[in-house]
Amino acid sequence: MTKKILIPVDFSDASTAALHVALTLANAKNLGLSLVHIADGKSAEKAESELQSLTEKLKKENNLNIEPIVKKGNIFSGIASIANDNSFGLMIIGTHGFKGIREKVFGADILKLVKSVAIPVMVVQKEYKLPPEGIKKILFPASSHDTFSFKIESTIYLSNLTNAEVLLYTVEKPGIEWSDKFRENIRLAKREFEDKGIKFTRINEEQQSFSVGYSKQIMAYAKNNHVDLIALMSNAAGENYYFADSDKGSILTNDANIPVLCTSDKQIV
């Protein structure tokens, strides 16, 4: 079964940006879409009507299977409960960055959300415009996560959707040795990309400036090399727990408006 794309919709500029990306990917590969709105009790009826109207409009404009879903409840648990389903291969969500209304997903809240979702999540900012040529370069920083294979699988999935090249990226800091797990994960990524026929390039940089984490250098490389997407583990690796969330938040809300593909350590059961 070909898996669908899930798009949380709150009728804002951010969700419109996410929907545009989802429609482009879905039309290229003939994938189904599910539009989900999490509503409180007062707005549920109005939301159902608006989402149904949007669905019908998109069906007329695209030859795709598109369904609306309205669910009452908390945005974090509500989206996660729908997304953690074997029928979905990807979720695409828009974020307002650090500015926005509290009932919307913004700033650090987006990291909280993607940690709870078992399927890959592409996060796009409201100003993001998909380039005409699509997503062609995925920056793939290596890490020492025990569940690093999940990120490899997610990146392979998206690379197959977009025909993108993967840049397997590391930073060497003076006096800091890579752990055995880190080296093992690099070897695993190379092997999996080769086995699955994914075009990839190995990139290793020396530390350019002092920084506790890696986000500044990752973003500098992404901007300077016209990267279209950054692949990220949502959860912290054990050895980097003290700075990881700050690093991830900076990348998710980056000022270059580069989308981020997030992979959590959760599995669909």
Image (spheres, helix red, strand yellow):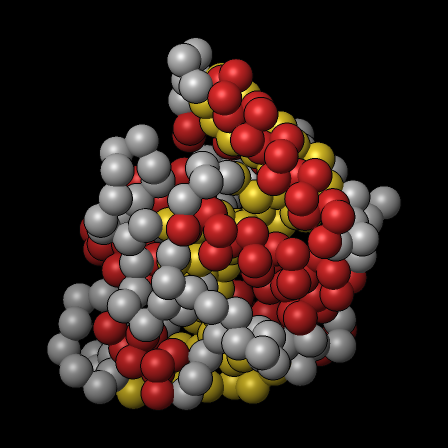
76 with respect to 247 (left or right): right
Q: Which residue lies at the image location 25% right of the left edge and 44% below the top edge?
A: 100
Q: Which residue lies at the image location 26% right of the left edge and 60% below the top edge?
A: 250
Q: Position of residue 112 (x, y in %)?
A: 35, 39
- Quarter of the rendering containing residue 244: bottom left
Quadrant containing the N terminus in the rendered view? top right
**Residue 200 visible within the image:** yes
69 with respect to 179 (left or right): right
Instruction: Report the residue that reaches farthest toward the top.
Output: 41
Q: Which residue lies at the image location 70% right of the left edge and 65% below the top edge?
A: 161
Q: Which residue lies at the image location 23% right of the left edge and 65% below the top edge?
A: 213
**Residue 148 visible within the image:** no
- Quarter of the rendering containing residue 51: top right
Q: Is residue 84 above or below residue 1?
A: above
Instruction: Report the residue that reaches farthest toward the right.
Output: 1
Q: Closest to the observer: 64 or 207?
A: 64
Q: Closest to the observer: 29 or 182?
A: 29
Q: Closest to the observer: 153 or 182?
A: 153
Quadrant containing the C terminus in the rendered view? top right
Q: How many marks?
A: 0
Q: Position of residue 7 (x, y in %)?
A: 57, 43
Q: Is residue 43 above or below residue 178?
A: above
Q: Position of residue 262 (x, y in %)?
A: 48, 54
Q: Position of residue 42 (x, y in %)?
A: 41, 13
